[in-house]
Image (cartoon, coloured by chain):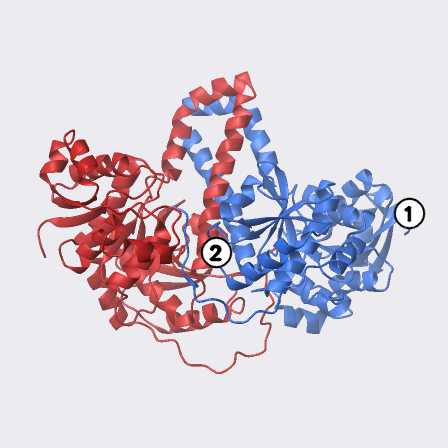
Chain colours: A blue, B red
Amino acid sequence: MSSTVRIALDVMGGDHGPDVVLPGAEIALTRHPDISYLLFGDAGRINDILKQHPRLAAASTVIHTDVVVRMDDKPSQALRQGRRVSSMWRAIDAVRLGEADCAVSAGNTGALMAMAKVNLKTMAGISRPAIACLWPTTRGESVVLDVGASIGATAQHLVDMAVMGAAMARIVFDIERPTVGLLNVGVEEIKGVEEVKEAAAALRGTGHPGLSYHGFVEGDDIGRGTVDVVVTEGFSGNIALKTAEGTAKQVAEFLRGAINRSFMAKIGYLLARGAFRALREKLDPRKSNGGVFLGLNGVVIKSHGGTDAEGFASAVDIGYDMVRYQLLSRIEAGMNDRPQVAATGPAEATVSGELQVSS
Amino acid sequence: MSSTVRIALDVMGGDHGPDVVLPGAEIALTRHPDISYLLFGDAGRINDILKQHPRLAAASTVIHTDVVVRMDDKPSQALRQGRRVSSMWRAIDAVRLGEADCAVSAGNTGALMAMAKVNLKTMAGISRPAIACLWPTTRGESVVLDVGASIGATAQHLVDMAVMGAAMARIVFDIERPTVGLLNVGVEEIKGVEEVKEAAAALRGTGHPGLSYHGFVEGDDIGRGTVDVVVTEGFSGNIALKTAEGTAKQVAEFLRGAINRSFMAKIGYLLARGAFRALREKLDPRKSNGGVFLGLNGVVIKSHGGTDAEGFASAVDIGYDMVRYQLLSRIEAGMNDRPQVAATGPAEATVSGELQVSS
């Protein structure tokens, strides 16, 4: 294990490309002086900006690429046009070649995932990769996955995601046995989706050393921090994430509007400013910026496309931690003890399809 | 059409039974003097309370029942034990018999849905009922369904839900052609789940008189009020609803905590109290209380189990409106023009399974 953490950056990805990626990289470097960068993109633009960032320049190697994956490219299109020649592909490829320990991109998520799957492939025993995010909760943060890599999941894949998510949580939260919950509708064990129930059965039976299975959790448990790791398939995971982001924004906007409508309220706001700032910081997407691709033969981090330098630095930080604290080895070890889903016959004809929506 | 709206109440349902249901019924009666009630439950308790509510008593008939469906009963259990004899069943049955125009219950949702399905059955052409809720948005409110009646949906069922949700929206919002969106991951038309894409194709082709198809929407579009009606299958719908409720609560709790930690902030809060109150009212679940069961041969409303009298009154109000403005006829009419999903062969092997998670 090299004493330097080598990070490959897709400098051209995201809404602002180098103007955000490079300042962000420097912020992360300040926090982790043992980082060295491979910067993939338009060398002319990059070198121009590096003139203002000598510290970053000293820790970086610039590799020129001509092709940029566009934000609206379909993944298949991006693969066709960007394979081997785009900054996004080259950053991922550097990981495959062993020239970098992780790749970070703020570019087109679907393209990044498509390229990463084709290039790095999934680890042995894992059927599909997942995207995991850090979700702010009342207790601090939780790992939530899959927030959008795939649609639907078999019971075994849900179990695999529990193992992978727990490996990430052990690093991020520095705890031995993170608690894991399966997202479901209605908390009682009988409810919900067949695959989720089968996964629950497999997880319940095991005394897996790297995680502690809690049981089912519902949508409102996520922000409560009921468990350290929340597992669900990618459609509902993405819906949950987007809905929560939208609701937080909606509450903030409404409060802002209500405050602006009244002079007394504006005065009040000024006095309570500290509290509002604390709230904004707590919910700041830039702080939690950084989706981790779990299940590939390499660490890949996805930053929000529209984030600023501070946000991009957060994404780099996560990549750094995943390398420094050996995410891949932990996942491998976790998969060795992986609970197996029992092959079952047709489910009992109980109340399949009916839900107990808690009143 | 009778000039009275006859409402059957499951008085024993919910966390507080008659202590909430009856005062709530009276509040609704104040708003709509043309309501008459059938009150199902423990006659002794009901009559005791009615002594304090002469106005309500004058508008009600009490029918004694012995059996109460418990909040933790499995739906099949509730059906077995409560069929024909419970307050919940009798309220629904009154609708079937034509003795009431709608039924309202704060009891066990799964049991209520199971009983309603068995007793009232679905309307012609509708495969499954859905639960629709009123979701507070930046623009006001949206109808969101299915928030928990079933898990998974065929493309035709999604289309049917669009028609039913639009019928409800025409009543609640008093507009001719509500906009309808299909919940999906990634906004571009190519992304997402096969059934959702097929439903989109069917809705796009139609010039349905009762709705205006907008396209795909994501989780954060719900609270934005991007469309009047959001359609999704019940698992993701329930996750979205619970997640939004949890996030709103989380934001409020955090803000409260941050304010309490500082004297200046507390002063500020007092001054801005009006704004906070406005926010609480806007997001008050009691105001939007009342899930509407769509697709049955009868109007059934589900109130939150833990709500208070004001909240229960809101649920009764919704039932009243659904009857007054002829929800069932509108759904029937909408189903006559219902877009048909084309029978297709296997989906093209494009990027099925890959998602464009917007960056």
Q: Mark 1 vs mark 2: which is more N-terminal? A: 1
**Percent x, y for residue A346?**
51, 71
Residue type beneath disc 1: Ser
Left or right: residue B164 versus residue B345 is left
Q: Report the chain holding disc 1.
A: A
Image quadrant in which the N terminus of chain B is located: bottom left
Same subunit: marks 1 and 2: yes
Position above or below: A79 against A275: below
**Percent x, y for residue A175?**
73, 41
Left or right: residue A214 versus residue A31 is left
SS of the residue under disc 2: loop
In this view, the mark in front (1 or 2) = 2
Give the residue number, with chain letter if any, for mark 1. A3
Give the residue number, with chain letter if any, for mark 2. A190
Position above or below: B118 against A23: below
* Quarter where residue A30 is shown: top right
Q: Residue furthest right?
A: A2
Q: CA distance from mark 1 to mark 2?
A: 50 Å
Near-viewer residue (A150 or B191) = A150
Do the numbered discs 1 and 2 sit on residues whose CB atoms are within 8 Å? Answer: no
SS of the residue under disc 1: loop
**Percent x, y for residue A56?**
84, 45
Left or right: residue A325 versus residue B268 is right
Q: Residue furthest bottom?
A: B345
Q: Residues within 10 Å of mark 2 (few under 14, many from 20)?
A: some
Residue type beneath disc 2: Ile
Near-viewer residue (A359 or A52) = A359
Q: Residues within 10 Å of mark 1 (few under 14, many from 20)?
A: few
Q: Is residue A187 visible from the viewing direction of this image?
A: yes
**Residue displayed at 55% across by 26% down:** B258
